[in-house]
Amino acid sequence: MLGLQCPKLLWYHFNRPSDIPPIDEATQAVFDEGKNVGELAKSLYPNGVTIDNSSFTEGLRQSEKYIQQKQPLFEVGFMSNNCYARADILVSYDQTQWDMIEVKTSTKVKDEHIKDVAFQKFIFMNAGIKIRNCYLMFINKDYLRKKELSPKEFFIKEDITEQVDNEIINIPNNLLILWEIVNAKDVSNIEIGTQCYEPNLCNLHDKCWPFLPKRSVFDLYIGKQKAFELLKKGITLLKDIPDNFELTDNQKIQLINNKNNAAYINKEAINNFLNKIQYPAYYLDFETFSTAIPILENTKPYQQVPFQYPLHIVKEKDSVPVHVSYLSERKDDLGKDFMESLKNNLGDAGSIIAYNAKFERGVIEGCLLSNPEYAEWTKKIFPRILDLIEPFRGFYYYHPDQKGSASLKKSFTDLNWKKL
């Protein structure tokens, strides 16, 4: 799968693995989450055997041994045509055929999953293992955990045999191309492209992209396709984009700002936004955590569960903010205390201001799953919410150092509120 996304990464994997940057903590956390989901999937097959893959040869030896016993097998791998594939779960259908099950942490079937399973089936079939059907086991996003976790309800198992068989016909030719890449002396001619971040961010991204200058064409707001088009023309600096190149209104603002090296300020639009603020004003931000496997009762997979918030209350315009904070001390239902604290601190009137407020709304809605008694109160506060991202996403204010982003950190890079 490495080569299907990024041929250069495949080459480095075989020829210069030490040059591949180490996995960061965030990526490792994703891998750990996947391992946890995989272990939960195994519980659906209590008589299964996990293959010992502590070494490559031992994994192959055990796979050959246990495939004869017709038990469910986990992490079983085989080789054929000088290629290796490992299946998450293999379940015996009868004495001659097996069902292949791939476990994913996603909440739907994706194209890359089909390619992954197709490669596995191709290798297994060529190794003499007859595969009847192929399934993808993924997370049911609507699963609501009760007191006890239910693996059967947590997972959805979908038959993808037809899609896999349609994809398998491409594998022989793909393998020829990929082996040519592996055996190539050099891959410096492979340029950056969408493969650098689709379907996942490539491990070589930070190695391949530093040639771009500061304030490059890739800073264009929602403009990666245009950036690649400009790169092919030899244009890398945003300020060098020709006047006749088609840009959106916001991208034109970026171009002018970069040429002038100054911020763009639409004072009228900003004033109109600020005039929406009704006092007392409540500046709010949530701290949350999420897990693929919900650990709390009445929560869903990947639900953002709140445990802390800082709140700054400005009673009148230009008055000194009053600071309020909340930190949960509970380990069971965090939502109850959280919602009660919000209700006590947000008052009955005044604007509730959050940055990218869609997130805060979603967190509150998630809390209603276990605390429906706050539904009426929620209906009253939602109309009071004002999203502070509006002036930045709407380009009422834009500075070149934002690099086309409306994120909180980027938007406040050069912002002096009093001067503004």
Image (tube, helix red, strand yellow):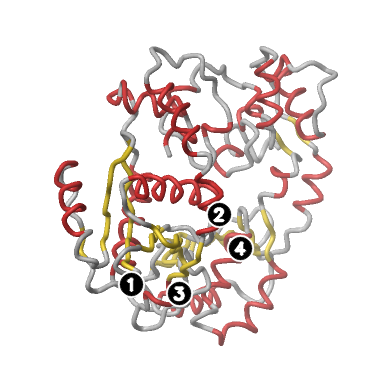
User: Disc 2, disc 4: CB below 8 Å?
Assistant: no
Badge 1 amino acid? Glu
Q: Residue at x 43, y 70 (%)?
A: 155
Q: Quadrant of residue 349?
A: bottom right
Q: Percent position (x, y) of residue 131?
A: 39, 58
Q: CA distance from mark 2 to mark 4?
A: 51 Å
Q: Residues within 10 Å of mark 1 (few under 14, many from 20)?
A: few
Residue indicated by mark 2: 163
The residue indicated by pointer 3 is 299
| Mark 2 vs mark 3, CA separation in Å | 33 Å
Query: What's the distance in space between the residues labelled 4 and 3, CA to CA?
Result: 27 Å
Of the two numbered discs 2 and 1 on the same chain, state the one appearing first in sequence.
Answer: 2
Please state if 342 lies on the left or on the right of 150 as rendered.
right
Amino acid at circle 4: Tyr
Residue named by callout 4: 282
Crowd rating for badge 4 (residues with CA inside 10 Å; few <14, some 14–19, many 20+)? many
Which of marks 1 and 4 precedes in the sequence? 4
Q: CA distance from mark 2 to mark 1?
A: 48 Å
